[in-house]
Every structure is written in C-alpha cells, then in structure tokens.
Image (cartoon, rainbow, N blue to C red):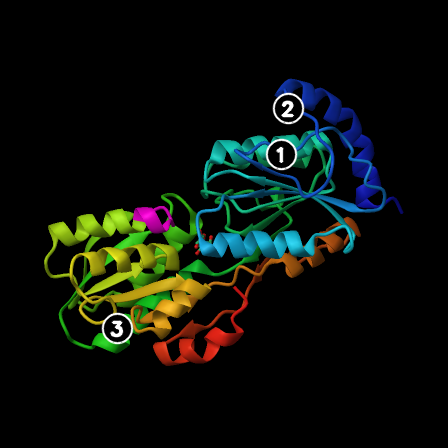
Amino acid sequence: MVSRKNARHRLAGAFAGVAVLALGLTACGGSGNTDAGGDADAGGDSGSGDLITVGFAQVGAESGWRAANTKSIQDTLTKENGFDLKFSDAQQKQENQIQAIRSYIAQGVDVIAFSPVVESGWDAVLEEAKAADIPVVLTDRAVDSEDESLYVSFLGSDFVVEGEKAGQWVVDEFGDEEINIVELQGTTGSAPANDRKAGFESAIEGHDNLKIIASQTGNFTRSEGKTVMEGFLQANPDIDLVYAHNDDMGLGAMEAIEAAGKVPGVDIKIVTVDAVKDGMQALADGKFNFIVECSPLLGPQLAEIVKQVVAGETPEKRIITEETTFTQEQAKEALPDRQY
Ligand code: AHR
C-alpha cells in the first residue's frame, strides 16, 4: 500500500514549485526554523529523508502559556524523535498564519499543525491544504468551519468547561453576596475567549447577585490586561472580583490593583485560567484566589497524532486534555513540581 506520505509527496512536489514562486517566499534550509511575522521557511521538499516534516503555525508569544506550548512542541518534534519541524510565529495575526500555512503547502510538508488565532475565516486555506492532500491537525484552539473534513483532528482543552469551572468557584465562594465582577477577555474572536466567556456566564446564570459590570479584551497579554484593569478601576470604585481569561492578564490586573492602593486577592479577588508558574506563584502568595488549569504540554500528543496520520491511520477527531483547578493551598503544594 502506498502510504499517505509517499502519495502526497508526488503531488506536493509539483505544486510546491508553482506556489513558492507565487508567494515570493525566501528559501532557507534547516528544521525548526522560527520566523517571526508569519513567514515559514520555504524551498520545496526539505530533503529530510525519512523524517516526518511538520509545518507548525503558532499563534505568537503572547503569554507564559504560549511560551510553554511552543517549548513542548519544539522539544518533542525533534530530529531525534523522527520529525523535521518547520515553525512559524504569527505574532497574533491571522494573515500571518494563513501565509505560513500556504508556505507549508508550497513546501509539501507531510502534516500541517496550527493553533488558530481566531475561530473564523479558515475555510479557504484549509481547502487548499486538502486539495494538496496535506492533513491538518488543530492544536489548542478550534476553528468554526462547518466542514469537519478540513482537518483530521483537534487536540486541546475544552474552554467552555474551563469557564464553567471558574464561574462555579465564584458561585460556591460567594453564595448570596452582592459581587461586582470585571472580565478580562482573551483575544477577540478566539476560541478560548468565546468559550471561557460563555462557560463562565452559564455557570453564574440565575445568580443575580453576581454581576459582570464590565468586560473587555486584554488580548491575553500582561500589558493589555494591566491597561484595561486600570480603566476598569477608574470607572468603577466597587469592583469585587476579576475574572481573567488567562494568568498573564490576571497578573497585569494584579499590578493595576496594587498601583491603585488595593490588595489583590483580598480587596479584589482574582480568578484566572492557565496555571503557569507565575500565576501559580501569585496564587500561592494569596494575590490570586483560584486558577483553572489549561495544559500547554501538547507536544507529545501532537507527535502521536502526526505519526498516526502519516501511517494512514485515523486519529480521534477530538482529543481533550485532562485538567484540574487550584486553590491557594493546592498551588503551594503543586508549585515545586510545576513543569511550566
Ligand atoms: O489558547 C490558549 C490560551 O492562549 C491560553 O489560555 C492563553 O494564555 C494563551 O495565550
């Protein structure tokens, strides 16, 4: 039987020459190349022999979570493990990711994997990958395409459940108390921002004492989280709780609260998602109050999926990572062994 890899290489070889010219991309060799701005290295079949060539289009480097996710992928998809990884950083811009994916198609990689910046607008480029017979694996974030044949598998978290866990903690913690909540949303249009918002809202629904009085994007970054929180504090003297869609924005909010002369974790409670080391430290220090875990360590599972696909097997369509939650006491216990 002709494996998917060999059959597709013949097709991709012809396609690559035309597409590289059309895109005007610069050729460069090697593996695991990181090219900020979305340009992935191009140049046709990389001559990687029996290595499985994977083009990975990363969102960016917006958070501690993302740094850990990139490390997990780069540490796993190594030559020693049988992979030739081509890596690009889209700097949180969808157009850069689309350009990177087109470059991977042009190069005729064996598998494309990416974590979509936003949920919408992928059908055209995914159809191009499908036409070139290059399987696509979604990691971390989903797309809203109705045609599920455009990707072979999704590997990541259930962001709705994460939002529900955060909301449920607030419900359990505050009972009937009147609580004014401000929400720091992730990147507008991204799956984690949409789903964590929806999950949280559904968990607090029917509890009229829990009010979201302001909600704005902080784009998953510490600096934007801080700026947005400064605005919230100026506009609202009675904030009781911050729900941040990730640790980094929570850490930015923490700085803004301290700068406003209040005590984070006491005067204003902070609930976040991720559980990266900096967030866990803030939780252990009593400056955060609760964290919902979101695991960035997707490299090993991605490697398995890629191997299955190249072997002509069908991986599970949706693979959800197992995650937990942390209170302040649990963070103190977990911190010494925390991997990221
Ligand atoms: O998609 C996962 C989210 O993206 C993480 O929660 C956040 O920190 C990252 O930027």
Question: x, y (%) of residue 28?
Answer: 70, 30
Q: Which residue is mark 1?
A: 40
Q: Are marks 2 and 1 in contact (CB under 8 Å)?
A: yes
Magenta span = 218-224
How many neighbours does mark 3 have within 10 angstroms: few (below 14), some (14-19), or many (20 or more)?
some
Mark 1–mark 3 Cα distance, whole angstroms, equals 46 Å
Seen in the image, is 47 located left or right of residue 278? right
- Secondary element at image label 3: helix
Please say whether residue 215 is visible from this viewpoint: no
Q: Earlier in the sequence, mark 2 or mark 3?
A: 2
Mark 1, residues whose alpha carbon is within 10 Å: few (<14), some, or many (≥20)? many
Kindly identify the amino acid type of the residue bearing the numbered disc 1.
Ala
Between the residue at mark 2 and the residue at mark 1, the CA separation in whole angstroms equals 8 Å
The one of 103 and 311 positioned closer to us in this rendering = 103
Task: Specify the label residue 25 is tagged with.
Answer: 2
Residue that numbered label 3 is attached to: 171
Of mark 2 and mark 1, the one earlier in the sequence is 2
Quarter of the image where one finds residue 5: top right
